[in-house]
Amino acid sequence: MTTHQEELLASTRRALLHRIAAAQAEERAPSLVATVVRGGEAVWTGARTSVEGHAPDEDVQYRIGSITKTFTAVLVLQLRDEGVIDLGDPLEKYLPGTGVGEATLAELLSHAGGLAAETPGPWWERTSGSLRPDLADVLGEQPLVHPVGRRFHYSNPGYALLGAVVEKLRGATWEKVLRRDVLEPLNLSRTGVRPKTPHAGGWAVHPWADVMLREPAEDLGRMAPAGQLWSTTGDLARFAAFLTNGDARVLSIESLREMRRPAAPAEATDVASGYAYGLGLELRHRDGRALVGHTGSLPGFLACLAIGVEDDVAAVVLANCTSGPMLFPVAADLVRIVAEAEPRIPAPWRPLREFDSTVLELVGQWYWGTQGFALRLPADGLLSLEPLSGTGRRARFRSNGDGTWTGLEGYYAGELLKPVRRPDGSVSHLDLGSFVFSRQPYEDGASVPGGVDPEGWRGIG
C-alpha cells in the first residue's frame, strides 16, 4: 500500500512517531510498526525496532491473532447475505452432534454462546493443531460454562465452530474460502495462514531483564479461524478501509454496520469500561471517541486494529512480543492525534436532488408530552428526530414508500413512525410506536392517550 505521508502535517507525523517510539521503548518491544488510515488510504507508517538499521515497514508480516476472528465473521455474514443461513439458526442445523447445537450463529459470532474461553489442554496457542484434529477435541467433554445466550464470554472454540460451518456450506477449506472471497477481492496479498518473507520472528521478553526468548509459531489446525492469520499493516490498512466503507464484492456497508452494533449481553464491568462486542468486532470508547476493530495476540505477537468511524481515521499497530505494550491505547491515541490535529474537512452541503413534497408537512417542531423535538429532512433522505434540549431519545427513519417510516437506531429502531391525518388530509399528529407527537405540548384536540385536562394549562393559585 502506498502511503501519502506528505498529506499529514509535520507536527502530526512527529506526534505519531513519538507515540509509537514511547510504546516500543518503555514497554520493551523487539519491534513495533504502525500505519494510520484516513479517507480509505494509508497516510502514515512508522516503525521502531531493537535491531539497528532494520526497522520493519508496512510490508513485513506479523501474526495478528484474534483479528482473524473479524475475517471469519465476514465469511459468515456473506453466507447470511446470500440467503444460505440465518444468524438466528442454531448451530445444530449445520453441525449436528457437537453438544452445543443450541447456540445460534449470532451468539457464536458475539461470544454469547456460553462456550468455554479455551480448548481443553494443552494450551492451543503453543501446541500443534494436530493435537486437536476434530471439533470434539476443540470442545472437550464440557464445552459449555454458561447458559446459552445469557452473557458475553469470549470463546476461541466458538470461532472454530464458525469456521467449520463455513467449510461445510462452501465445500472448501476455511483457508481457501477466505482467500477466494475476502483476501483476493480486497487485494490483501500479504495476508495468509502461513508466514512469507519478510516476516517478524516472535519473541518473549523477560519481565525482569532485558533479554529475549524465541516463541514457537504453531499451525493451529481447527482453531485457525480463531487466530491463525499473518498480515501486515499495509494489508490491515486496506482491511480497515473496507470495514469502514464496505465493498460490494465482499460485504455491504449495511452488513458492516450490523457487525459494528453491540450484539452480546454486556457484563457490568464491560459497561463501566466502555467495552462491547458486535459480530466479530470489538466496540470501545476512549477519550469520548467510539472505536471499532479488534485486538489480537499469540505467543510472540500482539496486534490491534482500531477505527474511528465518525472521524474516518483508523490505526493498525503490530508488535512481536508475547506481552509488553498494550496496543489498543496506542492505536486509539494514533486515531486521536490525527482526528484532533487535522480534523476531517466536511463535504460541501448540498440540497436533496428530489423529494416527496408531502414530507415537508412532517418536518419542524413536535412535542411528546412536554418534551420538544425537531424532525428534520437532511440531504441523506432519512428523517431525523432530535430532542431540542440536546439530551433524550434520537433516531433516524427510513421511508417505507407508503407514507410511513421505520426507525433505524436507538430506542426507536424497528418502530413505525406514522403520520395521522385529519379528514381534510392535514397532519394531526405523529404516531411513533404508540407515542403521540403533537405540534404543541398536550395540544387541545390532539389524540393524546388519556386525554387532555379540559381546564388546560394553569399557574399556582
Image (cartoon, rainbow, N blue to C red):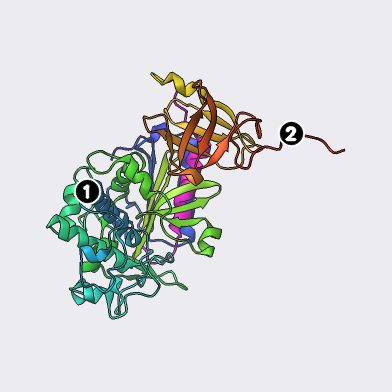
Tag shown at residue 456: 2
Residue 369, compared with residue 291, is above or below; it is: above
Magenta run includes residue 7: no
Q: How many labels sit on residues?
A: 2
Asked whether 88 or 378 is in front, the reply is 88
Viewer-side residue, 448 vs 286: 448
Question: Alpha-carbon neighbours of circle 1 within 10 Å: few (<14), some, or many (≥20)?
Answer: few
Which residue is at the far left? 171
Q: Quadrant of the C terminus?
A: top right
Q: In the rendered image, which residue does mark 1 sit on? A: 83
Give the residue drawn at x 15%, y 55%: 170
Give the distance between the C-alpha atoms of the residues marked 2 and 1, in whole angstroms: 55 Å
Vertical arrangement, residue 163 with respect to residue 312, above or below: below
* Mark 1: amino acid: Gly
Instruction: Name which residue lies at 49% across and 43% down.
Output: 412
Residue 196 has which mark? none
Say which element carries label 1: loop
Front residue of 448 and 272? 448
Q: Does the image show residue 372?
A: yes
Which stretch appears magenta?
A: 320-349
| Position above or below: 101 against 425 | below
